[in-house]
Image (cartoon, helix red, strand yellow):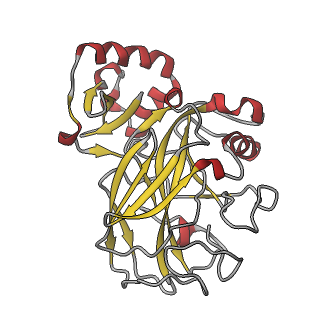
């Protein structure tokens, strides 16, 4: 099932690929809860809500998706985490050489049609948008065994990790964690509709021109390992968003006034607008690497 948010904190499901069925009235006290509390209620008690949603979908046809203004499927997660370099995308990289590490993103994610703000912050050399698979936690998780980890996943969604290249990595706040640097959507697809999250095509476009195009099978540390590692140090909560990293081929500069698109097989397609006052940058900044091509040796500043 595909779960989305729209209008004034209403919850819907996608039917027949292009019809939105409003299921908001099945959620008790929805109007006095915060948007995040509403979606967490649905996620945490999913077995019950799925039955309610199915009943409504059997009776209502819904309205065309084209007439609906989508909101972020997760409005403000307790945690939004993203994996550091986690793809075998260069000859010198392997699961054994890539440590499993994460950084925080701002919890207020940008939803479909929303705006990413690219600011003029010296010494930013270039902005980039990394297309990634994200998963949403369905249960509280602490000290989870890798063999049990997939039981804690609720669903999946496309995700853009916006990066300001050239800023210090002493803290990820400025280069990775600013407001609007996490884009999620168009909706959450529940895990039962995704037979293998480690075999999905991920694609992105800038102004309609192809950028990234890769398969999640090249992920170095897969989702069960990520949950097991994270839950050693953090208690993961229903609704937490975890982005799994990116394959760096196809990356290039992005600038205010441009349009980003992402599509992941089975999970849908979303568009985001780039705004701000950052000076235009049209040349990638890593020495010896041309724009829109992957590095073949560890030169310059490592992309994460």
Q: Is residue 226 left or right of residue 163?
A: right
Above or below: residue 136 compared with residue 269: above
Q: Which residue occupies 37% across, 15% down?
A: 52
**Image quarter for residue 167?**
bottom right
How far from the left and from the top, in percent, is residue 202?
49, 51
- Along the line of sight, which residue is nearer the eye, 294 or 47? 294
Q: Which of 237 and 189 is in front in this view?
A: 189
Q: Toward which corner of the image does residue 153 lie, by quadrant? A: top right
**Is residue 1 left or right of 17 when viewed as pictured?**
right
Answer left or right for 186 relative to 164.
left
Residue 28: image location, x then y, percent: 36, 21
Q: Which of 153 and 140 is in front in this view?
A: 153
Question: Is 164 above or below relative to 224?
Answer: below
Instruction: Quadrant for the N terminus, please.
Output: top left
Q: In this view, does 100 lie above or below 51?
A: below
Residue that lies at the very extreme toward the right in this rendered image: 96
Above or below: residue 131 compared with residue 51 = below
Give coordinates of residue 229: x percent, y percent. Answer: 75, 46
Left or right: 12 with respect to 141?
Answer: left
Query: Who is closer to the viewer here, 26 or 61?
Result: 61
Q: Quadrant of the C terminus?
A: bottom right
Residue 13: x %, y % from top left: 33, 29
> What residue lies at 61% left-to-right and 86% top-to-bottom?
288
Q: How many labels does the image show?
A: 0
């Amino acid at each position: 099932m595909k779960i989305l948010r729209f209008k004034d904190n209403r919850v819907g499901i996608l039917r027949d690929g292009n019809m939105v069925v409003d299921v908001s009235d099945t959620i008790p006290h929805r109007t006095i809860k915060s948007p995040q509390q509403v979606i967490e209620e649905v996620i945490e008690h999913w077995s019950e809500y799925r039955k309610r949603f199915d009943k409504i979908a059997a009776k209502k046809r819904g309205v065309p998706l084209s007439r609906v203004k989508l909101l972020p499927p997760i409005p403000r997660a307790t945690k939004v985490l993203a994996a550091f370099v986690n793809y075998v995308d260069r000859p010198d990289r392997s699961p054994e050489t890539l440590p499993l590490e994460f950084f925080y993103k701002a919890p207020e994610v940008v939803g479909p049609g929303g705006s990413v703000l690219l600011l003029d912050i010296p010494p930013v050399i270039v902005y980039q948008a990394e297309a990634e698979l994200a998963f949403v936690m369905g249960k509280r998780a602490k000290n989870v065994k890798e063999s049990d980890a997939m039981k804690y996943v609720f669903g999946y969604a496309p995700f853009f990790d916006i990066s300001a290249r050239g800023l210090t990595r002493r803290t990820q706040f400025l280069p990775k964690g600013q407001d609007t640097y996490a884009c999620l959507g168009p909706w959450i697809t529940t895990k039962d509709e995704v037979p293998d999250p480690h075999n999905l095509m991920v694609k992105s476009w800038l102004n309609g021109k192809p950028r990234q195009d890769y398969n999640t099978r090249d992920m170095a540390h897969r989702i069960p390992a990520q949950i097991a590692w994270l839950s050693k140090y953090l208690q993961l909560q229903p609704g937490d968003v975890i982005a799994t990293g990116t394959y760096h081929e196809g990356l290039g500069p992005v600038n205010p006034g441009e349009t980003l698109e992402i599509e992941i097989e089975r999970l849908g397609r979303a568009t985001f607008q780039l705004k701000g006052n950052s000076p235009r940058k049209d040349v990638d900044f890593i020495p010896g690497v041309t724009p829109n091509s992957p590095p073949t040796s560890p030169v310059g500043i490592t992309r994460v």
